[in-house]
Amino acid sequence: MGAKEYGIFLPIGNGGWMVSTTAPHPEASYAWNRRAAVYAEEIGLDFVMSMAKWRGFGGSTDHWGRSLESMTLMSALAEATSRVKIWASMHANVHNPAIAAKMLTTLQDISGGRAGMNIVNGAYAAEFEQYGEWDPELSHADRYVMTELWTEAVTRLWSQDSVTMHTPYFNLDDCESRPHPAVRPTIISAGRSEDARAFQAKYADGAFLASDTMEEMRGLSRDVHERAAANGRVCKTYSMERNQFS
């Protein structure tokens, strides 16, 4: 077991961490997020991460109905901090891999090597239907096939001078993305499904897991560790309920 790491999900959407009518209701503002990130660094936390959210859930509090964009926010927070790791979220079903590779390389440069990418592939269809980026024909398993190819493309663009890939989801033709990051950005992925855990074990440096019981969390964490080891890799696991690293 490695050293424990702790961090926070930033309040990038209004309402922050809790769906509540009585809890404090932070707005989706840079001021709130900067305050949280700077405080996280001051008290010794290891990372701050922001989700990518394009539509909220309505209701009396309009939870997450107002949100900032993850990469832009984290670039600013990289300047506002000096030690804490800076992890932004990118949607594989929205962002072209060449665009994502360039954006993360830039964030890595700004942050002095603290950048990370939380890879997501869409779960809330209404977020993407509103601007025509949701394919209802893609199954859950198909989305992870797409995400694997997308991640392969991004990581190759971080290290190779030219990348050509033709897939059902995107095409790269003699695609260049220079400069390459001096240190590869950390790759993070959240999810506990069979497909998610297989992806984490194959590509991610860290896996965010959720569970209903501590026993279930131990089982999910053990499974990711064992799958990663079988791939000759190491993947850290984080509990989202306890922000605990195992």
Image (spheres, rainbow, N blue to C red):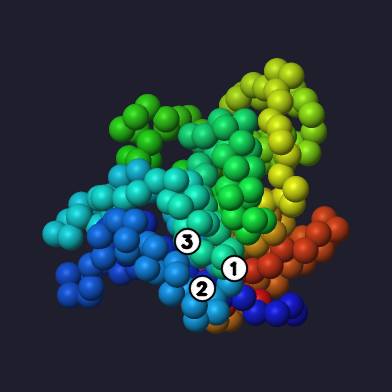
Q: How far apart are marks 2 and 1 (CA)?
A: 7 Å
| Residue 96 pos. (x, y %) | 56, 30
- The front one of 74 and 16 is 74
Viewer can see residue 84: yes
Q: Whole-percent x and y of residue 73?
A: 43, 51
Quarter of the image containing the N terminus?
A: bottom right
Q: x, y percentage for residue 180?
A: 73, 39
Give the image quarter of residue 20: bottom left
Q: Do the residues labelled 2 and 1 touch (CB within 8 Å)?
A: yes
Q: Which mark is residue 177?
A: none
Q: Name the residue under label 2.
A: 41
Q: Residue pushed farthest left?
A: 60
Residue visible at 30% across and 45% down? 55
Three-letter amino acid code at disc 1? Answer: Arg
**For this view, does 144 lie left or right of residue 27?**
right
Sooner in the amino-acid sequence: mark 2 or mark 1: 2
Q: Residue at x 37, y 62 (%)?
A: 33
In three-dimensional space, the C-alpha distance between marks 1 and 3, rounded to whole angstroms, equals 10 Å
Mark 2 secondary-structure assignment? helix
Number of numbered labels in the structure image: 3
Sort mark 3 into few (<14), some (14-19) or many (20+) by Cα contacts within 10 Å. some
Which quadrant of the figure has residue 98?
top right
Asked whether 64 or 232 is in front, the reply is 64
Q: Name the residue under label 1.
A: 83
Instruction: Name the residue tied to disc 3.
Output: 80
Q: Is residue 161 above or below residue 209?
A: above
Q: In this view, does 217 lie above or below 89?
A: below
